[in-house]
Structures are given as C-alpha cells and as structure tokens.
Image (cartoon, helix red, strand yellow):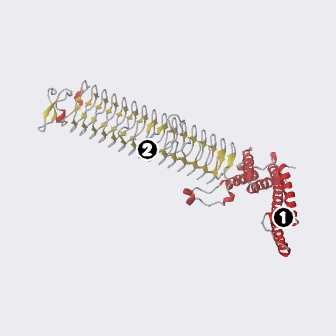
C-alpha cells in the first residue's frame, strides 16, 4: 500500500474506535472531563450522557456522508479516466482507419476519409495539428490535373470501375475524381482556418464563423503542392509554407493574416493572385515567384520587425500594391530598417523583379528601406501618391522602366536613389516632394521627363550628375531648396526650368544642352555655376534672378542666348566664354549691391547706371571696368 493509504486507513480505524468508545462508556468520561458537568445522579445523569452520545452520533453521521461523497467522486473520476482512455483508443482507431481510407483508389472512400478526419479534429483539439499535417501531406502528393481532352471525353465524375467497358486509369485514380477530392481537402482546411476577424475588419468580413469551428495556432505546410482555385480569404495561421506551390486558377488571400513567416518563394500563380488587405506579421518570402495573372496587394500590411522579399519574382501581368503599407522595426517600423545601430536591417526587397504588366504602388507607404534594385518594369509603373517615411531609403539603382514611370505627388521624406536607372517610356515626378537626398546619378531618360511643381526641400540634396535626358525635360516651377547638381549632365532635347526656384547652390558644371534650354523667370538665390557648360541650340534666361554669384566661366554658346530682363545681384563672370557674340544681355540689370563687384562680362558689354543705384547692361566698345 502507498504511505498515504496507510495513514488514511489507520486514521479511519482510530476514528471508528473513538466513536465506538464515545457511544459506550466514554460518554460519561466526556461529560465530566470535557463538558465539565459533575454532581448529576439518576435521571439527570442518564439524560446528559444520552445528549453526549447524540452529538457523537451526529458527528459520526456527517463523517460517514463525507466519506461517501469522497469515494463516489473518486469512483466517478476513475470512470471518467477509463472513459477517456477508451475514447483515445477509439479516436486512434478512427484516425488510423481514416488515414487508411486516404490511400484508397476509390474517390468516395478518400472523401469519406477526409470528412472522418475533419470530424475527429473538430471533436479532439489535441489532434488538430496532426490532422492538418495529414491533409496537407495529401495535397503535397504528386498530381496531374485532367487535360482538356479528359474534360470533353470523360462524362460524369464517378468511379471508372463503375462504368462498364472502361478500364481503370494508370495508378487507379481518375484525375477528374482526384480533383474533387483535393478541392474537398482545401475546403476543409480553409473552413476551419477562417477565424474571427480583428476589430478593424469585422465590418467587412463576409460571415462570422462559429467560434468552435475555428482551429487556431495552426502551422500550414503546402510546400510544392498543386492547389486549385485556392480560397484562403480571411484565414489566420501562425506560419504558412507555400514554397514551390503551383496555384491553378485564381488564388484568394484577401484579408488573410499570417502571424508567423509566410513562404511563397518559387511558387507559380497561374491565375489572378489576390492578397488585398492581407496582413504579414512575420517575414514574407515571394523570392523567385511567378505571377502569371494579375497580382493584387492593395492595402496589404507588413508589420514592424518583418521583411518582405520579392527578389527575382516575375509579374507577367498587372501588379497592384496600391495603398499597401510596409512597416518595419523603428517608430512605425519599416522595411529594411534599423531598430538601433547594432540591429540587423529589415525590409522590403523587390530586387531583380520583372514586371511584365503594369505595376501599381500608388498610395503605398514605405516606413523603411525598400529595394527595387535591378528590377525591370515592362509595363507602366505607378507610384503616384506613394510615401517614403523619414529615416527610410528607396533604391531603384539599375532598374529599367520600359514604359511610363509615374511618381506624381509622391512624398520622399527619406533618401531616394535612382543611380543608373533607365527611364525608357517617360518619367513623371510632377508635384512630388523630396525632403532628403535624392540621386539620379548616371540615370538615362529616353523619353519625356517632368518634375513640374516638384519640391526639393531644404536639406534635400539633388544629384543628376552624368545623367542623360534624351527626351524633353520639364522642371517648370520646381522648387530646389537644397544643393542641386547637374554635373556633366546631357540634355539632348529641350530642357525647361522656367520659373524654377533654386534656394541652394545650383551646379551645371560641364552640362551639355544640345537643344533649347529655358530658364525664363528662374530664381537662383545662392551660387550658380554653369562653368564649362555647352549651349548648342541657345538658351533663355530672360527675367531670371541671380541673387548669389553666377559663373559662366568657359561656357560655350553656339546659338543665341538671351538674358533680357535678368537681374544679377552678386558677382558675375563670363570669363573665357566661347562664341561670346551669341550672348545677349540687352536689358539685363545689375542690382545696386552688386555694382562694386568684380564682374567679367562678355566682350562688348558694359554697365550703364539706371538712375536708381543699379545698372543696365548695354552693348558697347568694351565691358565696363
């Protein structure tokens, strides 16, 4: 016997003996020594002793009742455990039979096995993950979908063995029947993974599933599976593996939630792919994926601390990421973002992607670094209204835009790099705002380019060094509030900077203007340098204002260049200009504060007082000393 049982038994024997003694001669002893009653005789003594025995009997009755309750509960617990052991054994038998049915050659038997597993998982939470693993393993098994000829020739989808004169197909499975089995397996999974929506999504959830039907905290492994018309809308899983999977028909992941890592790397989506409003709370991998239909990621969210990878992916039709939000690890988080100096980078990577259809990122928000390095946009690229948050960076280095690239009204609060990018179909940055450094170093613009009414804020350095504009470029009314450099930039078509404002230094050193260049009404508030620039088709600086020093040293003017109504408020130099006779300064003004500066005017030009403290430039015999 166990020590506890021995103690309980001895205590029970002692308790019974004590009760028996108190019901006998011990009652008189209790009356005298415990109750302290003495001096009673006759009937009074007998009544007092009977009262003691009554109390002892009542206590004994209560203890007997408690013992009965204890032993009844113990027996019930034993019975419950026995029942549970029996149920487990029964569940094990049912599980084994259901799994065996999945290997049957007959489609109805396989279907029965699936539904038996579903019911078993619904009744036994401990078996849910195991049963999900079995169903996903079934979907990962090799399968060849029916061909068009099979569809036309086959007739009703019933077991072929039941059709007279038809031989059983190789392997014993009709692909049409197997399709139905696989669709049932998919429905079982998605039905029980479609959980209650978060509060912000409940209004637009199509139907609230019963709470007991949802299987939470499931890990889903459909690696290299062939999935048909897969509907994962509003489903929630911890981790999901679709790496190498093939999706035939449209794939629906709208409003799906991935609480752990999601792997779609190397997957093939042959129909439209819908990830609208989906939430990736862990890393999401789409590396090397092929989207052969339209891809929709509108309103998708990448949470803080997570990374999104599309390296080497191919979008053969339209790709839409409008209003998507890519969070990361700092503040609101950010793709490829530093949590601190020692933290690893996190982020969004679209490196070396091919977009064969239109790509829509309009209204997308990048709270951290995003990489599109080396990507090819073979359709229109839409980034209208996109936002790059402060502290983040956006990289398009070496990317190719074969059609129109639109960044109208986009906001770049972080660095943006277009180093060596090719814009073959036109680039539009109208109304865009740049609040940090932006580089188009070595970029090639083969069609029309427009930065009209764009704003480069103070502290936002702009580099177009060695870029080439092979189509016309418009910077009309653009505000350059920081350092601006067009060093050795080639303008092979018209360049329009009319009414632009340069609040920081403006450098056009070695720039080559092969066509007309217009700076009409432009304002240069700090130093301006056109040193060594070449104007082959003429330029207009009419009504331009040079509020800082202006240098055209060594510039070449091959056609007429006008400065009519221009104002020079600082030191101006046209020293060593070539073909200076092409420069027309008629009506240009020199402000009073610049009268005493050492100017170098083209040969034949001089300053004449204008009667208001300033001077007007006139053609004369020699420049004013």
Point out the residue furthest to the bottom here: 43
The residue carrying pointer 2 sits among few (fewer than 14), some (14 to 19) or many (20 or more) residues within 10 Å by Cα, namely: many
Residue bearing the label numbered 2: 407
Which residue sits furthest front?
39
- Which x, y percent locates residue 578? 26, 25
The residue indicated by pointer 1 is: 29
Question: Observer-nearest residue: 118 or 576?
Answer: 118
Instruction: Work out whether residue 371 can be spotted.
Output: no
The single residue placed furthest to the left in the displayed view is 611
Image vertical order of residue 23 relative to residue 372, above or below: below
Find residue 138 and report its horizontal and vertical position in percent: 75, 47
Image-based side of 78 in relation to 395, left or right: right
Whether residue 21 is visible, yes or no, is yes
- Closest to the observer: 333 or 380? 333
Q: Is residue 5 left or right of residue 327?
A: right
- In the rendered image, residue 91, in percent from the top left (x then y), is placed at 81, 54
Q: Secondary structure beneath disc 2?
A: loop
């Amino acid at each position: 016997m166990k020590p506890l049982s021995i103690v309980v038994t001895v205590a029970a024997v002692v308790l019974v003996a004590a009760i028996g003694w108190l019901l006998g001669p011990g009652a008189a002893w209790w009356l005298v020594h415990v109750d302290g009653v003495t001096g009673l005789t006759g009937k009074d003594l007998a009544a007092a002793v009977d009262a003691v025995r009554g109390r002892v009997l009542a206590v004994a009755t209560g203890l007997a009742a408690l013992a009965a309750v204890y032993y009844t509960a113990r027996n019930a617990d034993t019975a419950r455990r026995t029942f549970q052991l029996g149920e487990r054994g029964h569940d094990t038998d049912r599980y084994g039979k259901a799994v065996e049915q999945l290997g049957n050659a007959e489609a109805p038997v396989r279907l029965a096995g699936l539904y038996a597993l579903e019911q078993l998982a619904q009744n036994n939470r401990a078996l849910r993950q195991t049963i999900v693993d079995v169903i996903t393993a079934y979907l990962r098994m090799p399968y060849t979908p029916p061909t068009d000829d099979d569809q036309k020739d086959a007739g009703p989808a019933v077991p072929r063995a039941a059709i007279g004169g038809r031989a059983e197909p190789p392997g014993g499975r009709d692909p049409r029947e197997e399709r139905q089995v696989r669709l049932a397996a998919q429905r079982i999974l998605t039905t029980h993974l479609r959980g209650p929506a978060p509060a912000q999504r409940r209004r637009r959830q199509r139907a609230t599933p019963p709470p007991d039907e949802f299987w939470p905290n499931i890990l889903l492994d459909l690696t290299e599976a062939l999935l048909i018309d897969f509907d994962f809308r509003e489903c929630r899983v911890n981790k999901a593996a679709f790496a190498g999977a093939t999706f035939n028909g449209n794939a629906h992941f709208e409003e799906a939630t991935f609480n752990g890592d999601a792997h779609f790397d190397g997957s093939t989506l042959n129909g439209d792919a819908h990830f609208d409003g989906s939430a990736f709370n862990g890393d999401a991998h789409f590396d090397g994926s092929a989207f052969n239909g339209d891809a929709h990621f509108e309103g998708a969210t990448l949470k803080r601390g997570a990374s999104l990878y599309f390296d080497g992916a191919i979008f053969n039709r339209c790709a839409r990421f409008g209003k998507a939000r890519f969070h990361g690890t700092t503040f609101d988080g950010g793709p490829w973002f530093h949590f601190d100096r020692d933290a690893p980078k996190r982020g969004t990577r679209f490196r070396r992607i091919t977009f064969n259809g239109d790509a829509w990122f309009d209204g997308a928000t990048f709270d951290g670094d995003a990489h599109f390095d080396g990507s090819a946009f073979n359709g229109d690229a839409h980034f209208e209204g996109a936002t790059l948050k402060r502290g983040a960076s956006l990289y398009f280095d070496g990317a190719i835009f074969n059609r129109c690239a639109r960044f109208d009204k986009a906001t770049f609060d972080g660095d943006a790099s277009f180093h060596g990018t090719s814009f073959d179909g036109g680039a539009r940055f109208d109304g865009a705002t740049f609040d940090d450094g932006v580089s188009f170093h070595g970029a090639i613009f083969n069609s029309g380019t427009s930065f009209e009414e764009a704003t480069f804020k103070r502290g936002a350095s702009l580099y177009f060094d060695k870029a080439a504009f092979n189509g016309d470029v418009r910077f009309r009314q653009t505000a350059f509030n920081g350092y601006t450099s067009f060093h050795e930039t080639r303008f092979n078509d018209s360049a329009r900077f009319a009414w632009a404002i340069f609040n920081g230094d403006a450098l056009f050193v070695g720039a080559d203007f092969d066509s007309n260049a217009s700076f009409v009404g432009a304002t240069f508030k700090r130093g301006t340098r056109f040193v060594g620039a070449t104007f082959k088709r003429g330029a207009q600086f009419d009504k331009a204002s040079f509020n800082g020093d202006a240098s055209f040293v060594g510039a070449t003017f091959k056609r007429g260049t006008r400065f009519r109504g221009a104002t020079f408020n600082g030191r101006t130099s046209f020293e060593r200009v070539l073909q200076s006779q092409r420069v027309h300064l008629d009506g240009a003004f020199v402000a009073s504060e610049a009268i005493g500066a050492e100017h170098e005017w083209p040969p034949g030009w001089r300053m004449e007082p204008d009667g208001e403290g300033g001077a007007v430039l006139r053609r004369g015999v020699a420049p004013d000393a």
